[in-house]
Amino acid sequence: MISMSKVNFSVLHSFLSNSIGSVFEINLHIYNARSYLNSVANMLKGKGFEDTKSYYKHCEMFFMEIESRQKVRESQKKLIALCSRFAEICVLFLIFTALEALIINGYLS
């Protein structure tokens, strides 16, 4: 049975090759956040990832070697909180700058 992603990639490759007029190599990069060893262990259990070299001609799999998704999630939450705080400070600065301009120009006297 052919997977849908394999069909979609074949259609995309055919379309792009015919559009240009010649066959060229398309390399699709697939990033896996897990480590390579964890991915292979999951594959042996019948889960995990597919071997791109066997199933997909023009794809490369890259492993990011992130051991703990929970730590990444915690870091993301901290970054979002920091960005939100920065946005609040920027809004306050704009409000104070606008008030200062109104006072200097005599609009609030």
Image (spheres, rainbow, N blue to C red):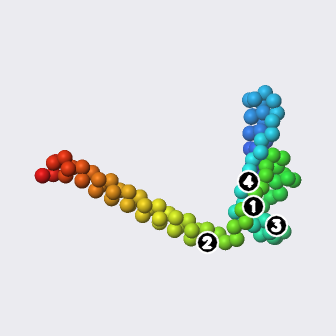
Gap between marks 2 and 3 measured at Cα: 22 Å
The kind of residue on which mark 4 rests is Ile
Gap between marks 3 and 4 measured at Cα: 16 Å
List the residue tagged with mark 1: 63
Circle 3: is it few (<14), some (14-19), or many (20+) Cα within 10 Å?
Answer: some
Identified at 24% across, 53% down, the residue is: 100
Residue 78 lies, in percent from the top left, at 51, 68
List the residue tagged with mark 2: 71
| Image depth: mark 2 or mark 3 in front | 2
Residue 86 lies, in percent from the top left, at 43, 61
| Image depth: mark 1 or mark 3 in front | 1
Q: Which of marks 3 and 4 is nearer the N terminus?
A: 4
Image-quadrant location for residue 76? bottom right
Residue projecting furthest to the top: 21
Q: In this view, does 76 lie above or below 14?
A: below
Q: Tell me, yes or no, whether the two marked residues, 1 and 3, touch with CB atoms within 8 Å.
A: no
Which one is in front, 109 or 51? 109
Q: Residue 40 carries which label?
A: 3
Q: Which of marks 1 and 3 is nearer the N terminus?
A: 3
Q: Which mark is residue 30?
A: 4
Q: Earlier in the sequence, mark 2 or mark 4?
A: 4
Which one is in front, 45 or 81? 81
